[in-house]
Image (tube, rainbow, N blue to C red):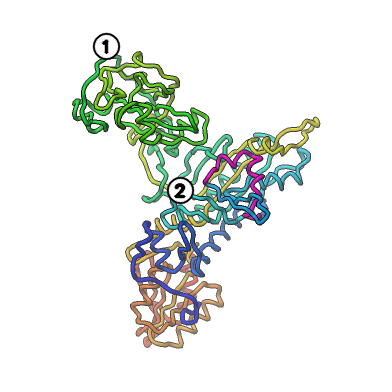
């Protein structure tokens, strides 16, 4: 690409709308342009990165024998009603009507459609296994789109689906995809961890996430430095430690004026957070629940949803909390409460603790489980850093991650709902075992930039850089064009910066867009040398003009 005659622009200033490093750098380097909230255009430079990632994914997927197809995004709503997922996705799904007033949605993920396609082929057990995939745009009406390409409403996703006769077959297909994902992310040069996760709206038997490790990640990963335990905090299991029994003290109501928060009540009553129990009011549909956890812990909503077998729970609105507790917010407690109470299992081992009295400015002290009735006991709290690893008992650590891929063992959830059946050796009809496997391409780009940048801009790994080499021409020089032609003929992806701008502008732009190798054709050309600079390490070396082509070829090979 010769810049003078190409579509190319950069921005010198930070983009104030972008709150993430990757969003800012991608916008400033002219790779993406914001169209609306959570919607972006990939400009030519950015689209080259997309295509490179897609190529790697395609190569690895095809190696496994998976076959690519493409499906529409505009889908009749009935498809999701039949599987029961119209309600599960709820307002996360973009819905629209056609001119005949029929209901349509924009596909958030395509399990239902792949089932419909698979039905055409699957009749008997001999028709499996197989794996189909596509790379297509997906749509989700995210409540809070943010962080550039990390949380968007339209995104490119590779989604694959496997079809097997039995669980052993599913296991084989699942592991094939798992290893393929490792190969893909290894080739892309991403630092990632694989964690167990919630099956969420997908349902099924098992879910694992491929998480790129970055400070901006929205997921909290719970990792053990001593063993292979790795899990999303949503499903991370708490290990209950035995606590010594204590003599029960008499229950007492105490005046705690204007002390509604945990911090206020601990200092006012001079107790530790561990001697207080929080009571939070949640709403699931029309039903309210009180969730009780130790004062130093947060409620884990994913665990509560699982326990209640509901798709969604939300914290009750302050007006509802006031009605239910007959007090101001901050004074909720279990004694006398008229809604079902769920207590965290650790509370069974707590004695003489503090709770709200359901009366403004009052708490109870010396509370014990005998003093109220609860309906459900379970692990409903979040793990904390330094908690014991459920596998090896060593202290756990936290990291932040961006989910770039996921793998689901769906089992028969969709095949049963949508009657995807086959006849086995004995002519018995059985549901097909399915797996589903996603990769977010925009998120890979965001994660790569989050992991590979410095004060000057992006430092793309060679594998995904929009171009491998940039030639910066200082003053017009015939050798620059000659070198451009020679490298291009060798198949090297090269930019020639032949614009009529100051050298400093050219250097800054090539640094910003993250081209791994820069060749400067400048003053040293008089002595038969050009300068080669490695973007990531800032190392420079002078190379003879007659050796530069083979030097660059070798360098690319090494990087
Ligand atoms: Zn461990």
Q: Which mark is residue 68?
A: none
Our reading of the magenta stretch's main secondary structure is helix
Tag 1's secondary structure?
loop
The location of residue 550, given as percent across then percent down, is: 49, 74
Q: Residue at the spot x=28%, y=21% of the render?
A: 353
Q: Which residues are magenta?
A: 71-91
Q: Are marks 2 and 1 in contact (CB under 8 Å)?
A: no
How many numbered marks does the figure carry? 2
Q: Residue at the spot x=43%, y=27% of the render?
A: 289
Is residue 228 shown left or right of residue 69? left
Query: Foreground mark, 2 or 1?
Result: 2
Q: Residue at the spot x=36%, y=23% of the render?
A: 346
- The one nearer the camera, 325 or 522, is 325
- Tell whether position 87 is magenta: yes
- The one nearer the camera, 241 or 274, is 274
| Badge 2 density bin: few <14, some 14–19, many ≥20, Cα 10 Å | few
Image vertical order of residue 68 relative to residue 559, above or below:
above
- The one nearer the camera, 558 or 283, is 283
Split into quadrants, the picture shows ligand 1 in the one at top left
Residue picked out by circle 1: 247
The location of residue 425, given as percent across then percent down, is: 79, 32
| Badge 1 density bin: few <14, some 14–19, many ≥20, Cα 10 Å | few
**Disc 1 CB within 8 Å of nearest ligand 1 atom:** no
Q: CA distance from mark 2 to mark 1?
A: 49 Å
Residue picked out by circle 2: 143
- Tell whether position 77 is magenta: yes
In primary-sequence order, the first of circles 2 and 1 is 2
Tag 2's secondary structure?
loop
Q: Quarter of the image holding residue 71?
A: bottom right
């Amino acid at each position: 690409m010769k810049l003078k005659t190409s579509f190319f622009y950069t921005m010198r200033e930070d983009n104030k709308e972008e709150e993430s490093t990757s969003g800012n750098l991608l916008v400033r380097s002219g790779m993406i342009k914001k169209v609306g909230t959570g919607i972006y255009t990939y400009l030519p430079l950015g689209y080259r990165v997309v295509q490179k990632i897609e190529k790697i994914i395609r190569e690895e997927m095809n190696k496994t024998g998976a076959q690519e197809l493409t499906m529409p995004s505009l889908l009749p709503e009935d498809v999701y009603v039949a599987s029961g997922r119209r309600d599960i996705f709820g307002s996360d799904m973009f819905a629209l009507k056609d001119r005949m007033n029929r209901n349509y949605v924009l596909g958030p993920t395509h399990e239902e459609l792949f089932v419909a396609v698979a039905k055409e082929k699957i009749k008997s057990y001999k028709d499996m296994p197989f794996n189909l995939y596509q790379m297509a745009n997906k749509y989700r009406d995210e409540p809070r789109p943010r962080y550039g390409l990390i949380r968007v409403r339209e995104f490119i996703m590779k989604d694959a689906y496997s079809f097997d006769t039995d669980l052993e077959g599913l296991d084989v297909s699942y592991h094939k995809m798992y290893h393929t994902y490792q190969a893909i992310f290894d080739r892309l040069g991403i630092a990632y961890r694989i964690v167990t996760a919630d099956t969420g709206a997908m349902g099924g038997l098992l879910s694992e996430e491929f998480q790129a490790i970055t400070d901006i990640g929205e997921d909290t990963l719970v990792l053990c430095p001593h063993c292979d335990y790795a899990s999303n905090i949503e499903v991370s299991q708490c290990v209950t430690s035995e606590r010594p029994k204590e003599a029960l003290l008499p229950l007492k109501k105490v005046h705690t004026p204007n002390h509604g928060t945990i911090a206020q009540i601990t200092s006012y009553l001079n107790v530790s957070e561990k001697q207080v129990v929080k009571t939070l009011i949640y709403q699931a549909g029309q039903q309210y629940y009180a969730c009780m956890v130790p004062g130093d812990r947060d409620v884990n909503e994913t665990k509560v949803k699982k326990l209640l077998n509901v798709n969604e729970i939300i914290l009750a609105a302050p007006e509802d909390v006031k009605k239910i507790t007959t007090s101001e917010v901050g004074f909720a407690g279990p004694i006398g409460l008229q809604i079902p109470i769920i207590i965290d299992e650790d509370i069974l081992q707590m004695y003489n603790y503090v709770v709200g009295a359901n009366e403004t400015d009052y708490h109870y002290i010396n509370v014990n489980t005998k003093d109220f009735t609860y309906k459900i006991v379970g692990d409903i709290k979040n793990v904390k850093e330094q908690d014991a690893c459920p596998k090896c008992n060593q202290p756990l650590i936290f990291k932040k991650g961006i989910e770039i891929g996921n793998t689901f063992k769906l089992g028969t959830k969709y095949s049963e709902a949508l009657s995807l059946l086959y006849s086995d050796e004995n002519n018995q009809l059985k549901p097909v075992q399915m797996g589903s496997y996603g990769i977010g391409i925009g998120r890979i780009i965001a994660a790569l930039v989050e992991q590979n940048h410095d004060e000057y801009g992006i430092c793309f790994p060679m594998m995904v850089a929009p171009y491998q080499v940039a030639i910066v021409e200082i003053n017009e020089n015939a050798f620059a064009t000659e070198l451009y032609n020679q490298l291009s003929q060798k198949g090297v992806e090269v930019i020639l910066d032949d614009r009529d701008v100051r050298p400093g502008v050219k250097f800054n732009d090539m640094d910003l867009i993250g081209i791994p190798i820069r060749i400067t054709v400048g003053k040293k050309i008089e002595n038969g040398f050009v300068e080669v600079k490695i973007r990531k390490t800032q190392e420079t070396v002078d190379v003879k003009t007659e050796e530069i082509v083979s030097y660059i070829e070798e360098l690319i090979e090494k990087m």
